[in-house]
Image: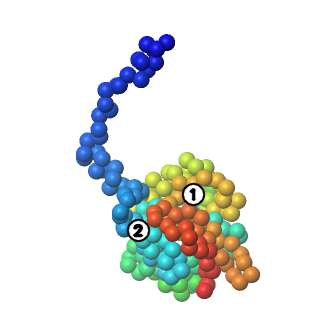
């Protein structure tokens, strides 16, 4: 028995260390945080236009090349209003924004009044079986700076594909889902909840990639 124990704990040959170039490639990934780095320094963002939200998010804005999941208690709580400042800025800089299978028909005069340049705004109508594919292709191709997608039912694999497509296309990916998805795991870099309160729509940060001060209040009203 002692011989077997001795053999089990005998020193083995050291494992080869990763090549410096391979290690450097891993460390350059935006999802890796290194101690001592400035908060949000490796996160590329675009300002949300909402001062309360920007003050809470690492990098002070929507994460670029990432999936942002917005869970809504019911339609019409201001979920599009929250995105309008960033989307308007993108279209005014002649960058395309795509809306995939919205549950309601967009009203062009209202979009224009919010600052959207309609020449760079695209609506794609697709059935339930094609909408996920359409959103993934728009993100992956790099032809859209931002993609908005409504996906009532989704599995982790679908969400992961959208996250990877956003990374590939270096785009803002916004996914709207019902509040019942709150208990499901998600690869999204940013996860928000929009719910109703007596004083109006309330936003809460549920998950956030990067250095995030959890001591701060993560709930605030859409309209201060």
Q: Residues within 10 Å of mark 2 (few under 14, many from 20)?
A: some
Indicate the quadrant containing the C terminus: top left, top right, bottom left or bottom right. bottom right
Residue of label 2: 39
Foreground pick, 127 / 151: 151
Q: Quadrant of residue 90?
A: bottom left
Q: Earlier in the sequence, mark 2 or mark 1?
A: 2
Kind of element beneath mark 2: loop
183 w.r.t. 195: above or below? above
Element marked by disc 1: helix
| 65 relative position to 124: left or right | left
Q: Nearer the viewer, residue 125 or 145?
A: 145
Q: Residue furthest left?
A: 20
Depth check: give the residue in front, 189 or 15.
15
Q: Farthest residue to the right: give it.
A: 198
Image point (46%, 18%), residue name: 5
Tell me the quarter of the picture where residue 145 sits.
Answer: bottom left
Q: Residue at x 64, y 53 (%)?
A: 184
Which residue reaches farthest front?
2
Q: Tell me: residue 2, above or below residue 21.
A: above
Residue 124 in percent (x, y) is at 54, 65
Q: Which residue is drawn at the image coordinates 61% and 84% (left, top)?
A: 223
Q: Where residue 102 sits in the image (x, y, percent)?
A: 61, 67
Q: How is the image coloured?
A: rainbow
Marks 2/1: CA–CA distance: 36 Å
Above or below residue 120? Residue 172 is: above
Question: Taking 15 as reference, is 121 left or right?
Answer: right
> Which residue does the numbered mark 1 point to in the structure image?
131
How many marks are shown on the rendered structure? 2
Q: Nearer the viewer, residue 137 or 126?
A: 137
Q: Is residue 100 visible?
A: no
Q: Does residue 59 lie above or below 28 as drawn? A: below
């Amino acid at each position: 028995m002692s011989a077997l124990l001795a053999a089990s704990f005998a020193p083995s040959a050291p494992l080869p260390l990763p090549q410096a170039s391979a290690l450097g490639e891993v460390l350059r990934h935006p999802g890796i945080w290194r101690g001592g780095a400035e908060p949000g320094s490796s996160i590329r963002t675009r300002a949300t236009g909402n001062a309360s939200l920007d003050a809470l998010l690492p990098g002070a804005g929507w994460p670029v090349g990432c999936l942002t999941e917005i869970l809504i208690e019911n339609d019409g709580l201001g979920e599009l209003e929250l995105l309008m400042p960033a989307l308007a800025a993108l279209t005014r800089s002649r960058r395309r924004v795509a809306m995939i299978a919205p549950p309601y028909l967009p009203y062009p005069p209202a979009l224009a009044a919010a600052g959207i340049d309609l020449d760079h705004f695209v609506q794609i109508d697709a059935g339930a079986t094609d909408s996920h594919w359409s959103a993934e292709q728009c993100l992956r191709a790099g032809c859209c700076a931002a993609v908005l997608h409504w996906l009532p039912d989704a599995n982790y694999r679908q969400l992961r594909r959208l996250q990877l497509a956003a990374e590939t296309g270096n785009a803002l990916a916004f996914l709207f889902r019902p509040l019942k998805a709150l208990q499901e795991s998600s690869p999204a870099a940013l996860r928000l909840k929009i719910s109703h309160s007596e004083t109006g729509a309330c936003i809460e940060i549920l998950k956030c990639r990067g250095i995030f001060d959890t001591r701060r209040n993560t709930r605030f009203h859409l309209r201060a």
